[in-house]
Image (cartoon, rainbow, N blue to C red):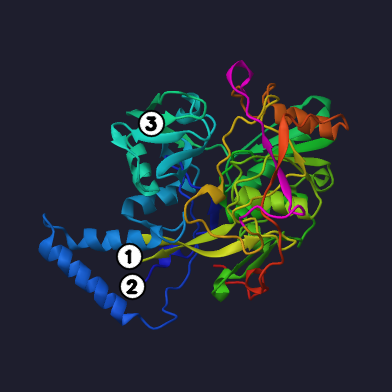
Amino acid sequence: MRFSRFRNIGLICSGLVAGVLLSIGISAVAQRTTSPLPLDELRQFSNVFAAIKNNYVESVEDSKLINGAIAGMLADLDPHSAYLDAESFKEMQTATQGEFGGLGIEIGTQDGFVKVISPIEDTPASRAGMQAGDLIIKIDDTSTKGMSLTDAVKLMRGPVKTPLTITVMRQGATQPIVVNLVRDIIKVRSVRSKMLPDDIGYVRIAQFQERTGADLVKHLRELSATKSPRGLILDLRNDPGGLLTGAIGVSAAFLKPDTLVVSTDGRVPESRHKYLANPIDYARGESDYLRNLPAWAKTVPMVVLVNSGSASASEIVAGALQDHKRATIMGNQTFGKGSVQVILPISEDTAIKITTSRYFTPSGRSIQAFGVTPDVMVTDTAKGDLFTIVREVDLQKHLTNDQRKEVESKPEEITIIEEVAPTGDNAPKPFRFGEADDFQLQQAVNFLMNKKVNRGPIKARKTAAAKPADMAAKPTQSTPPAKP
């Protein structure tokens, strides 16, 4: 059976999203067996299948058992591998276009429950006051204990304008919080911009989509309609990721041509590649939208804002600009999703999403499970961090980082900064990114204006020690895959 309709789907690196976007990566990858089939184990599976069919208290359809077995195999691998049934597969394809139905939240798992990584701005979830770190314990009357992310997404999705009740536990709250929402079409506006006082340009990317690179060029040109900015702030906070090509294009806008942006490395040759600031890698055969880029974008002083909700494609951009010393990274430790998923179709309308490689910054750093450490650590607000720190390392069965140990040990270890969380009247208050009460944005402006930066109430915490990477973890040069 041929699956020609998958040929032109691009690779995606993203965070887990419920009612918004699943953590997905797409690539046309041939299915083939690289080792002999384990006949004894398959015979055991056949015996279990027969035992269930013959003895279970109720009759079970064959397709349900097979689909459950496939889903179980993938769920046991890592948080980002999954079985996509017909409905999930269709929703995934729709999500990459930047418009879909739902609530507007990205999710992960913790302690067997669904946890909010971050709400997406201007969505039902953000307007209802849902916060990063909220632990979803019920969706309507259904407990989420032990629920898969796929099942949670299905419950949160539904017809537009229909109500949904989410019950959450929030850090610092003594009782569960009931949040009443109304489903809506989620239109993620990828790029926003405005000119701040003192000729500082501000650009926010909420999610990397097909047109993010081209939209960025448009916004940069609008910012310099009268005069070139003296500084630029690129805001990637709570950006869960998206299309890899978008991340490469955004990085290329600020780097020299043909500069290394990111490398991927995995077991099979197709998973090993070096992506450059070149139209071949970010435009994928389309016209080069960066040819209209204003010249000042390559040299303007830059600050990139990140936090614990900055994941995957966001981390690619932050890591590339940091390694090439093109921008100062400011904010909090990022999410730490340094893996790449691909979609392998198994029928005309179903597929499996499977992790095939890790990605590496230009200097060879793997940020898997640890994220990007900002050059200047600044808390979310002047009173401390608002967003609960939940990252890849907190997800069950996450991939390890071969370059670092997930243990605390010696004094020479790297350190990161975390908040001293105040309570009561001194607790951090919610704010909107890019507005006047945005503390981190204020500090980014101070940095660009050579003024004192207020880092907020922070303290040092030891984390994993860095050690030389195993040879297998180092990115390697390979023959680029065919680009249709």
Asked if the residue under mark 2 is in contact with the one under mark 1, i.e. CB atoms within 8 Å, the reply is yes
Which residue type does callout 2 highlight?
Answer: Met
Point out the stretch of residues depicted in magenta: 406-428
- Seen in the image, is 382 located left or right of residue 169? right
C-alpha distance separating marks 1 and 2: 8 Å
Mark 1 surroundings within 10 Å by alpha-carbon count, few (fewer than 14), some (14 through 19), many (20 or more): few
* Of marks 1 and 2, the one in the foreground: 1
The residue indicated by pointer 2 is 1
In the rendered structure, which amino acid carries the disc numbered 1?
A: Ser
Please give left or right for residue 453 compared with residue 46 in the image. right
Camera-near label (2 vs 3) is 3
**Residue located at (16% from left, 67% from top):** 51
- The residue tagged 3 is 183
* Quadrant hosting residue 3: bottom left
Residue pointed to by mark 1: 347
Q: Quadrant of the C terminus?
A: bottom right
Q: Position of residue 357 (x, y in %)?
A: 56, 65
Looking at the image, which residue is at 38% across and 43% down? 153
Which SS class for mark 1? loop
In the rendered image, residue 268 lying in the magenta stretch gets the answer: no
Label 2: element kind = loop
For the residue labelled by badge 3, is the local secondary structure a helix, a strand or a loop? loop
Image coordinates for residue 254, horizontal then vertical, percent = 76, 49
- Predominant secondary structure in magenta? loop
Foreground residue among 147 and 127: 147
Find residue 449 and report its horizontal and vertical position in percent: 86, 31
Query: Which residue is at a point 50% across and 60% down the rendered structure image?
Result: 341
Between discs 1 and 2, the one toward the N terminus: 2
Q: CA distance from mark 2 to mark 3?
A: 38 Å
Q: Residue furthest right?
A: 450
